[in-house]
Amino acid sequence: MSHLITRRTALGVGSAAILATLAACGSSKSNGSSGSQATVGTDAEVELTFAGWSLDTTPEFQALADAFTAANPNITITVKEYSAQDYDTQLTTDLSAGSAPDVFPIKNLLRYYYYMSNGQLMDLSDMAAGFDGDEAIDLTYLEYDSKYFALPYRQDSWLLFYNKDAFAQAGVEEPDGSWTWEDYKQAASKITAAGEMKGAYHHTWQSVVQGFALAQYPDADLTSGDYSYLKPFYETALEMQDSGDVETFATAQAQSLTYQAQFGTQKAAMMPMGSWFIATLLEQQSTGDADEFEWGLAPIPQYESGHEDAPITFGDPTSLAVNAALEGDKASAAKAFVAFATGEEGARAMAAIGITPAYFSETIESTFFDLDGMPQDDLSKLAFSTHDTRPENPVSETVNDIQTILNDTHSEIMTATTPVDEALSKAGEDIKGQGLTA
């Protein structure tokens, strides 16, 4: 199922409605099953812990905590730092030990099912209802069995970052919003031929190929056991690798290349990447860690033409959950913080530091594009604001195991260890053999 995220929407009233609902509840206890909350307006002193990762380079967690506590001085929030790479492993350990933070992010839909099925997330369906009719936020992919156990505070979508200066120097026309992958491949070839840098950079993640295939190929189904839909996307990736228009997968892996440096220091003129990179690029250009050059955003190239009004891309929401063990004033305060972070107030705090919030309106978009260094052309604004974003990881019991197998398949194909047809056929057989298909 797809859902159109057209970010040019009117301001909604979701977070205000949620907070009003919470404030109207007078019960002194709350847990995941009862659905009752303490009064948000209480003057009780409450201390909350909030999980985050890489706090020195990821400012969103402290920004949200600071914005909320400024409006609620009786509540204190301490951000507990985790490793970005090992976040889920460390959080799982803390949840099992009963020492997990009161509020914690869920990075993607891959882990959402795991935490939910283990009873570690408080039911937030009452809060989700507060967003009914609010077109500024999309909760579609967090619904499971008619319930919600987390709410999105970030919604990154994959876009095409491109170096405007490199296009001008090579005499290549910039993207116009209608590109297919064939157009992208041809532009990369022309820029490489100009000799200044490679035409593009494809990072080593499986999502760089598989995420687009799942989103754009008609009727693609991650849980079907048939992965032939990946073939044309791998053929394009291999052709660009073989022609030298992108760095090889093997080299990128062996040399631990970073996508930030490949684009930011002008090793490559184009790069498909998630919108989270915007904040990093702005910061690195301001500090000198990235070169000074003019860049822009374009819609991701399409498998089929005709999607100019709503280019199809992918991206899982990053959501916030409340520890199911909480009760009383602490549970109420935790839910109020999640309501704040996922609503307009939290979105404003996020946009002010270049992070893409899940709650998006014209006001939030203006805040985002007012940041120093942001491109101001119409295509960049359109690419950022309007797209059909589909999930990389549909919520399912088997998706984690399926993605593990497909990650191995990705490496086999990109290193030319196994031919495309053979690798995809083997992946399907393994997934079916393990009973992972729907």
Image (cartoon, grey):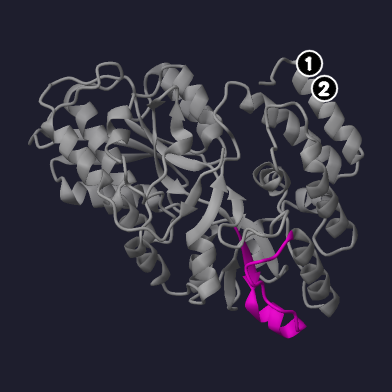
The image quarter in which residue 356 lies: bottom left
Q: Residue furthest front?
A: 306
Q: Which residue is mark 1?
A: 433
Q: Which mark is residue 331?
A: none
Image quadrant containing the C terminus: top right
Residue 246 in view in this figure: yes
Marks 1/2 in contact by CB < 8 Å: the verdict is yes
Residue 317 within the magenta-colored segment of the rendering: no
- Residue sitting at 82 percent across and 22 percent down? 429
Q: Which residues are magenta?
A: 159-180
In the figure, is residue 165 to the left or right of 239? left
- x then y, percent, for residue 230: 78, 41
Residue 128 percent location from the top left of the image: 32, 35
User: In the drawing, does residue 71 fall left or right of residue 377?
Assistant: left
Against 301, residue 222 (above or below) is above
Crowding around mark 1 (Cα neighbors within 10 Å: few <14, some 14 to 19, many 20+) is few
- Is residue 279 at all visible to an observer of this figure? no
- Residue at mark 1 to residue at mark 2: CA–CA distance: 6 Å
Return the residue found at the far left.
43
What residue is shown with label 2?
429
Question: Element at badge 1?
Answer: helix
